[in-house]
Image: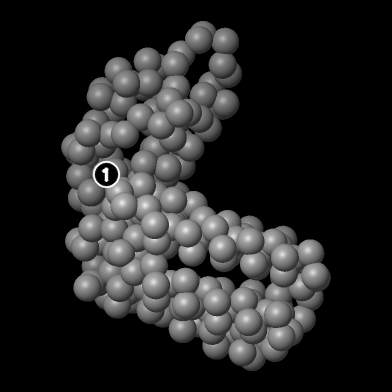
Amino acid sequence: MATPKVSNTSITSTGTTTGGRLTGRIYDELKIRLLEGDFPGGSKLSVETLKTEFGVSKQPIMEALRLLSADGLVEIYPQIGSVVTKYSAGEVEDFFRMFAAFESTIAAAAATRRTARDLAQLRQAAQNMEILDSEPDADARAHEYRIQNRNFHAVIHHMASSRIMADTSRRMWDLSDFLINAAETPHPFGNALTERNHDHHQILLALEAGDAEMARDAMAQHILAAPKIMTH
């Protein structure tokens, strides 16, 4: 198993945290590591190692792993244990086609419902990503791109004013980040900032124009380009 990175939210057992809250914190920590690509696809997650690291019993670890299994990030096998999910190239292609269709629908809705305040927030989000070109460290650049990219698209979800679409999309975004950072090419998006920022600019232009079809097409092209970047 890969050596995990310890984030600022690393967990220590105080004896006062309820089981449910403790499980949630372990789940959140492990999910971040999975989305960041800290655990390679197919690698085993040792319950004993995680128990020691987090200083907890087996129960909250297993509950967190079951939640991650429901997200499609981990697979649990009887007599074997928990393994980080590894998807085939065909499954990745299928996912991004489905993801593109869904996100383009959200973008089209956002184009007709956005406010001036929404657009100002989106312009700022786009600018935050553009400055990442100056970050020399590949790890830091890839990490920050993931965070800022999620923020950019979260603004668009807010523009669409649909909790159903936003909530449904959240799980897809987790799986998207997982697949991208599990790619064989290290930091695929962190090394393709020019192309990604160009796409974001086209999406922004469409939303500023209030053009639903233009927004739909720009978002679809942006999402569908992901598998190509991941393999180069």
Looking at the image, which residue is at 30% across and 73% down? Answer: 229
Task: State the residue at coordinates (56%, 16%).
Answer: 17
The image shows residue 138 at horizontal and vertical percentages of 29, 52
Q: Residue furthest bottom?
A: 213
Number of numbered discs overlaid on the protein picture: 1
Residue 40 seen in this snapshot:
yes
Which quadrant of the structure image shows residue 156? bottom right
User: Residue, x 37% and y 21% (percent of image)?
Assistant: 54
To which residue does mark 1 refer? 39
Q: 159 left or right of 11?
A: right
Q: Compared to 116, does 26 lie above or below?
A: above
Question: Which color mode does the image show?
Answer: one colour
Q: Determine whether, in the image, residue 116 is placed left or right of residue 38.
A: right
226 versus 48 height, above or below: below
Q: Secondary structure at mark 1?
A: loop
> Along the horizontal axis of the image, is 28 left or right of 62?
right
In front of the other: 142 or 21: 142
In front of the other: 64 or 182? 182
Q: Is residue 213 above or below residue 145?
A: below
Identified by mark 1, the residue type is: Phe
| Quadrant showing the C terminus | bottom left
**Can you tell which quarter of the image residue 191 is in?**
bottom left
Quadrant (top left, top right, bottom left, bottom right) of the N terminus: top left
**Residue at position x 53%, y 32% in the image:** 24
Compared across the picture, whether 107 is left or right of 47 comes to right
Q: Residue furthest top?
A: 15
Q: Position of residue 40 (x, y in %)?
A: 23, 49
Please say whether residue 81 is visible from this viewpoint.
no
Circle 1 residues within 10 Å: few <14, some 14–19, many ≥20: many
Residue 65 location (% of width, % of height):
39, 38
